[in-house]
Image: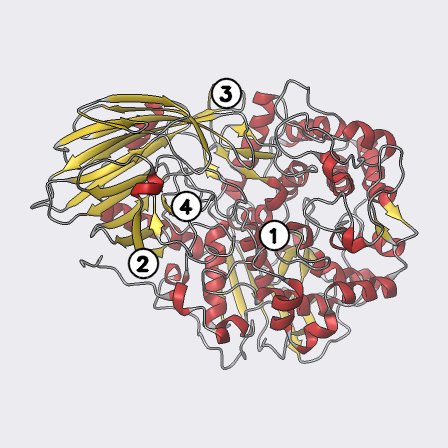
Amino acid sequence: MHRIPRPRLRGPAAALAAAALLGGVLTGGATAEAAPRTDGRLTDLVNPFIGTQNEGNTYPGASVPFGMVQLSPDTGHNTGYDYGENHIRGFSSVHLSGVGCGLGGDLPILPTTGDVTETDYAKYAAEFSHDDEKASPGYYGVGLRTGIEAELTATQRTGVQRYTFPATDKANVLLNAGQSLHRTLSSEVEILDSRTVRTAIRGSGFCQDTKPYTVYTVTHFDRPFTTSGTWNGDTVTEGSKKSSATDARNGAWLRFDTSKDRTVEATTALSYVDAEGAALNLRAEGGRSFDRVERAAQRSWEDRLEGVKAQGGSDELRRTFYSSLYRSFLAPNVGSDVDGRYTGWDQKKHRAKNFTYYQNWSLWDTYRTQAQLLSLLAPRESRDMAISVLRIDAESGWLPKWGYGTVETNIMTGDPVTPFLTNAYQQGLLKGYEEEAYRALKKNADGVPAAESAPVGREANVEYLKDGFAPYIKGRPHAKPGDSDYDHGASATLEYALSDGMLAEMARDLGHDADAARYTARAQNYRKIFDPSTGFFRARDTSGAFTGPADPAQSEGFHEGTSWQYQWMVPQDIPGMVDLIGGKDAANQRLDSFFAYDKLLADPAKTAREVWVNGPYAYYNADKYNPQNEPDLIAPYTYLSTGQPWKTTDVVHAALTLFTNGPTGMTGNDDLGTMSAWMVLSSIGVFPVQPGADTWGLSTPAFERVDIKLDRRYYPRGALTVSAPGASDTDRYIRSARLDGAQQSRTYLTTDDIRSARSLSFTVGSEPSAWGTSPEDAPPALG
C-alpha cells in the first residue's frame, strides 16, 4: 500500500510497556534520561493518541490552538474516536477533548470507491489498522483498508483533507449531513457547482436533549468532480443538487476520476452564524495547499509549546508533559467568523469588536486548573474568553454553566462561572470590565434565572440564601434539561460557598464592602452541612435533617463523588475546615487514610493504579482519593495547610505516574483540558489551590528546570524560571526555596509574586524538612 511520506509515530503502541507504565516520575538530575532538546521540535514529543482509550475521550485529529474546527476520525464511540475500534465512519469537523457524552461530530466526510449504495455511516465505515495511522499536532493520517490514504490538517476555521485514491473512475467523497455524535434534528445539503457543497446542520444534545444549535459548512474541492448526487434516507439520487431531511439520514456524494491524478484535496469551512459566514471563512483561510496548511498548523503548535521549556526528567515524562500542554490549548474554541460576527445565546447575530468571541464552556471542570494555566500562558486569549462569557450574560440574560456552541446545556452543578471569572479578574484580565463582570456575578450569586430562560444558574439559591444550604431532594423532576443542583444538594452547597468566598475577594477589591462582608459570611455555609455525629459533610433535606447513609463512603447528594472526596473542597477556608474536623493532627490522620499514604510511600505507582484507580474510568469507583475526577484535583495540596507540605509532593508525584505515553495514558475524561492542565501545573510545581483567587500552592517540580515565557502586558518580567537541581525519585523533598534569591518559607505564591519575580528555585533532598511547616507558611483563608 502507498505510504504517506511522513515520519511514523509509533508511540501509541510502543508506550504501553509495563516498565513505562510503572516507571518513576523523575530521573536523577545529573543522569537525566532526556537532556534539554535543542535540535528537535517540541511537537515531536506530543502524542495525540493519549487518552483515546478507556474513556479519556480525547481525539487524535487535526486542529490549531483554540480552533473552531477539530477535524478528526469517528470510529463509533459516542464521543468520536476510540483506540480499541477499527472502523472509521468519517472525518467530522467538530470535537471536544475529553467530554463525557456524545457531542459534535458534525459533517463526517469519508472517501470511498465504487457505487454509492449505503447511506448509514455505520454500514459504509472503512476498516483501518493502527499500523497505518499517525498523528501529530495539526496533522492526522491513516491508510484505510479500502486502499485510500486520508490526511487531515486545519486552520482556525477550516479543515483540510487530502485523499489519495487507487486508480479508478469511481472515487467518491461522502458528505454526511444527517448523522453526528449527538442528535441531528435537521439538515440541508446543496451542491453549488462542480467543486462546492454547502450544508446547514441543526443539532441538539449533550448527555440529553438541549436547545438546538446550527452549524453551517461549505466544502470546496481543488478540482471538479465528474458527477455527483445526494441521498435522503435510503434513497441515493445521482444528479440531484439539493436534499433536506428532518431527523433522518441526508447527504451529498461527489465522484472523481483518479485514473491518472490520484489525489483529491478539499477544504471545509464552518460558521455558527450563517452560510455567508462559512463562505467568508473559506475565502479568508482557504485556497492554500494541504502541505502549506499543515506546515502552518505545526508552526502554530510549536510556538505554543515553546512557551514552556522543560529540562531534565525521563523521556516518558517529557512526552506526557508536552502532550498534556498540547491538550490544554484545545479549548475553548473560536466562535466568531473572520468578520467578527457570531451567534449569541439569544440566537441573534452579533459582532465582536476588539476581541475574539469564544465558545464551549466546560466550566465545572476548567475553573479548577485549565483557566489558571491559560491565564499564565495565553492571557490575551484568556481575556477574550472572559469577555465572551460576559457577552453571554449581556445577550441571554444570565451567565453560563456548561455551554456548547450557542446554547446552554446545564450539565454539572454548583456555580462554576464565578471562580472562572474571578480568576480572570485576579489575573488582571478584566481591566475595563471589572464592574460589568461584578454586576453579572452578583446577579448570578443572589438570584435564580427566570423559569422561561434556558439556564438553571444557582438553581437552589432560594433555599441556600434562606437556610444556608442547598437541599438534597431525591427524585425531584428536573425543571429544565440538564443536571439539577437539588440532586446534589451537599456538593452544590460546597460549590456555592466556594464561589461566595471568591466573589467576596473581588467585591472587597472593588470597594463593595457591604457585599464583601455578606459573601464572606456566606462562604462559611460549608459548616451548615457538617454533621458532628459523623465528622463529615452530609446532605440535608428540605426540613434541614441530615439524609442519606451516615457512612461517608456511601454518602448521597454529592455530584460525582462521596463525602470523603468532598471533605477537602473548601479552598476558601481550609483552616476553618481543619478546625471543624478536630485540628491539624486529626486532619493529617484523615488525609493519610484518604490517600492510603503508608501504601503510597511503599509503592507510589502501584498505589495509584490499584488503590486510587479501581478500573479504567468511573466517577464513583472509589470512596476516597479519585485522581480521575474534578472534586479531588485540589485535595493533594491540603497538606500545605496542615503543616506537612512534603506529603503534597508525595501524592502529586504518585498521581503523575497515571499519565503515560499511550492510548490509556489519561486519568479520566480530559474535560476540555482539565486533567491535562492539572498534569502540567503539578509538574511545574505551581498549582492554583484557591481557584478563583490568586493563590498558587507549591510542590517539588517534576523537572530540574522549567522556563516559562510570560506575556509582558500582564507579567512585566516576561518570564519565570522554576528550578529544582538534582530532583529525582529519591531526592524529591523541598529543603528550602528562594524567590529571586530571597528565602521563601511560604508554601504558596500570589499572582503578584509571579508578576514581579524571575526565578523560583528549590533545594531538594531525600528526607522531609521543616520547610513550609510553620502555621504562617500555609495558604491563608480568604476574607
Q: Residues within 10 Å of mark 4 (few under 14, many from 20)?
A: some
> For this view, does 203 lie left or right of residue 367?
left
User: Between marks 1 and 2, how big is the CA–CA gap?
Assistant: 49 Å
The residue identified by callout 2 is: 129
Name the N-terminal-most of marks 3 and 2.
2
Name the N-terminal-most of marks 4 and 1.
4
Q: Residues within 10 Å of mark 2 (few under 14, many from 20)?
A: few
In the rendered image, the vertical position of residue 206 relative to residue 18, given as above or below: above
The residue identified by callout 3 is: 347
Which residue extends farthest right? 533
Which residue extends farthest left? 260
- Residue placed at 64% from the left, 37% from the top? 421
In the image, 222 versus 430, the foreground residue is: 222
Name the N-terminal-most of marks 4 and 2.
4
Counting from the top left corner in percent of width and height, residue 314 is at 49, 73
- Residue placed at 54% from the left, 31% from the top? 388
Counting from the top left corner in percent of width and height, residue 82 is at 43, 52
- For mark 1, give the secondary structure: helix
- For mark 2, give the secondary structure: strand
Closer to the observer: label 3 or label 2?
Answer: 2
Counting from the top left corner in percent of width and height, residue 204 is at 49, 29
Answer yes or no: do the residues labelled 3 and 4 have beta carbons within 8 Å?
no
- Residue placed at 70% from the left, 28% from the top? 477
In the rendered image, the vertical position of residue 522 relative to residue 76, given as above or below: above
In the rendered image, the vertical position of residue 644 relative to residue 532, given as above or below: below
